[in-house]
Image (spheres, helix red, strand yellow):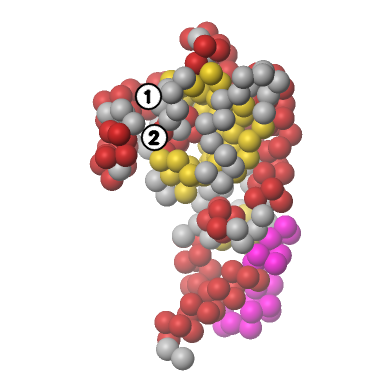
Amino acid sequence: MGTDAQGTRRALALLKVVGAHHAQGLRLTDLLALTGQDKSTLHRQLQALVDEGFVERIPSTKRYRLGVESIQLGFFAPDMSPLVERFRPVLNRIARLCEDTVFLAVRSGDEVVYVARQEGAYPVKAFVAEPGKRRPMALSAVGICLLARENDASVAALYARHATVYQNHGLSLAVLRELVRFARRHGYSEVRELGLAGTAGVGYAFAMSATTSMGVSIAAIRARMGVRRMRDLGRLLQDELAPYVATPSA
């Protein structure tokens, strides 16, 4: 068996071991015992999986668990993920307070992946995305807020990589820059009819860990999203999610 094939098999075996113990996570010593690999090889493969988002290291416990990419590919059912379980109470609360649709999304490269959705009581829904759906970052409220954490050169580079997609949605680089500037000034983002006509939304984003950036957004029909209400919803997101930002690795 070739060296490349052996390395691939070891990496997949390592991923399976991490997945089997995802809920509690595994220490490096645990992984050494369970895989039988030598320390240098294991550390190299583990770091590669972390860099690509398939495995995440929890800073507070130094344990390893599946990352966003593994969850997206189905190595671990999204509705069972501790990530979703952790945020489910606050998603429920925000949906109850605003009565509109609330989304939890994580960054995956140049896209955001929606991992949970909570419906509010208002009868007319804005289902801008289904859980598991990917969307270009600049076409989502969470994505705009994530981009606000980067410098102007990074924003322009992302736009250039996907210029055709954004132009097809009527989003110019100048408009994207203005949306990002707003998010930097206010700490939350506002989008109007960006991904789906007749809808608007607000978003708030933060780093959950060294390798995972994510956020929560509220989407509603455009008629419900006046200037004052969007401002109030932006503040609601900031207030409700503040404990998660303050203790990202708890």
Which residue is drawn at the image coordinates 67% and 32% (left, top)?
A: 118
Which contiguous range is marked in magenta?
18-39
Amino acid type, mark 1: Leu
Per the image, label 2 sits on a secondary structure element best described as helix
Are there few (<14), some (14-19), or many (20+) residues within 10 Å of tag 1? many
Which residue is drawn at the image coordinates 62% and 26% (left, top)?
A: 101
Are there few (<14), some (14-19), or many (20+) residues within 10 Å of tag 2? many
Q: Is residue 152 visible?
A: no
- Residue 231 is situated, as x and y percent measured from the top left of the image, at 52, 14
Which residue is drawn at the image coordinates 43% and 86% (left, top)?
A: 3
Image vertical order of residue 69 relative to residue 193, above or below: below
Tag 1 and tag 2, C-beta contact below 8 Å: yes
- Residue 133 is situated, as x and y percent measured from the top left of the image, at 52, 44
- Residue 158 is situated, as x and y percent measured from the top left of the image, at 31, 42
Numbered label tally: 2
- The earlier-in-sequence mark between 1 and 2 is 2
- Residue 138's disc is 2
Q: Which residue is mark 1?
A: 179
Which residue is drawn at the image coordinates 65% and 71% (left, top)?
A: 17
Q: Quadrant of residue 98?
A: top right
Image vertical order of residue 173 relative to residue 154, above or below: above
